[in-house]
Amino acid sequence: MARVELRDIVRKRRMVHRFTREPVADETLLRILEIARHAPSAGFSQAFRLVVLDDPGRLEWFWRLTTPPDELPELDQRIATGPPVVVLPFTSKAAYLDRYSAPDKAGFGLQSEEAWPVPFWHVDAGMAIMLILLAAVDEGLGGWYFGIVHGESDLLPELGIPDQYALLGAIAIGHRAPEDVRTQGSAFSRPRVSVDELVRRSHW
Ligand SMILES: Cc1cc2nc3c(=O)[nH]c(=O)nc-3n(C[C@H](O)[C@H](O)[C@H](O)COP(=O)(O)O)c2cc1C
């Protein structure tokens, strides 16, 4: 039974781009974000952190700062249909290097970045972000992960982010607007990969 519920939530999840003005109750938001505590992390480093922006003034400031100049004409529209909550996810490479310098991990030889086969601080963050997106669906809300391509250098000092933490994009959370009906974009123009393409048995 539980398996069916998970699959329903996974299939229902879509990136939501337009939201209603309805706020997200704080206890709902905390239930959604709390799930990230249960994300796996290499060496249980748990270096994932979240900064919540849910004050209307703060959100307007966020959109103004992060909207690229050529998209500024759409800013008012973006704010009007934007989410009531934007959560900024962060990770710390330094925390992983530190964790893997501890006596129980030092034997892996991962005290320096070059030794890591893949940056697990990014892998772990992806796992945690996905949990948040699924938890939002579970609460009857919508989520949208997007990259920050502009304004990061102004954003981080104002938010008091310590130097060792790197911004990983943004997660919008809110009530999906009825007009969030997408008929274009890569999620529509590109077919979903088939199971045969996805899964190879014993050999590529
Ligand atoms: C790492 C990553 C970066 C993404 N960046 C953006 C983005 O900057 N803007 C955006 O609108 N969507 C972004 N997306 C959403 C993808 O376009 C979306 O997941 C994909 O088209 C499939 O659609 P669906 O998630 O609604 O099923 C990103 C997704 C991922 C996983």
Image (tube, rainbow, N blue to C red):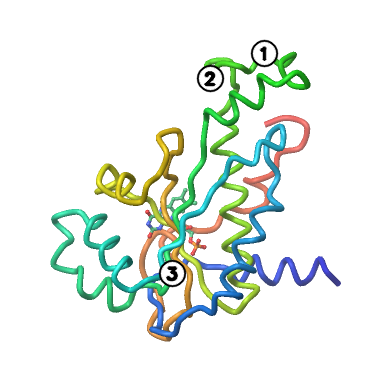
Which quadrant of the picture is home to ligand 1? bottom left
Q: Nearer the viewer, residue 196 or 146?
A: 146
Amino acid type at mark 3: Val
Number of residues whose C-alpha sits closer than 10 Å to that of mark 1, classed few (under 14), some (14–19) or many (20 or more): few
Q: Is residue 204 above or below residue 176?
A: above
Number of residues whose C-alpha sits closer than 10 Å to that of mark 3, classed few (under 14), some (14–19) or many (20 or more): many
- Outermost residue on the right side: it is 1
Give the alpha-carbon distance from disc 2 to disc 1, as whole Å: 10 Å
Tell me, yes or no, if residue 145 can be seen here: no
Task: Residue 123 in the image: state x and y as whole percent.
Answer: 59, 39
Q: Secondary structure at mark 1?
A: loop
User: Residue at 61% across / 67% down in the picture?
Assistant: 32
- Give the residue pinned by disc 2: 113
User: Residue at 20% across / 68% down in the picture?
Assistant: 75
- Quick check: 101 left or right of 159? right
Tell me, yes or no, if residue 3 can be seen here: yes
Task: Residue 154 in the image: state x and y as whole percent.
Answer: 25, 46
Amino acid type at mark 2: Glu
Q: Nearer the viewer, residue 163 or 75?
A: 163
Number of residues whose C-alpha sits closer than 10 Å to that of mark 2, classed few (under 14), some (14–19) or many (20 or more): few
Q: Is residue 67 above or below residue 12?
A: above
Q: Secondary structure at mark 3?
A: strand
Which numbered circle lies on residue 85? 3
User: Residue at 73% across / 30% down in the picture?
Assistant: 203
User: Residue at 61% across / 24% down in the picture?
Assistant: 98
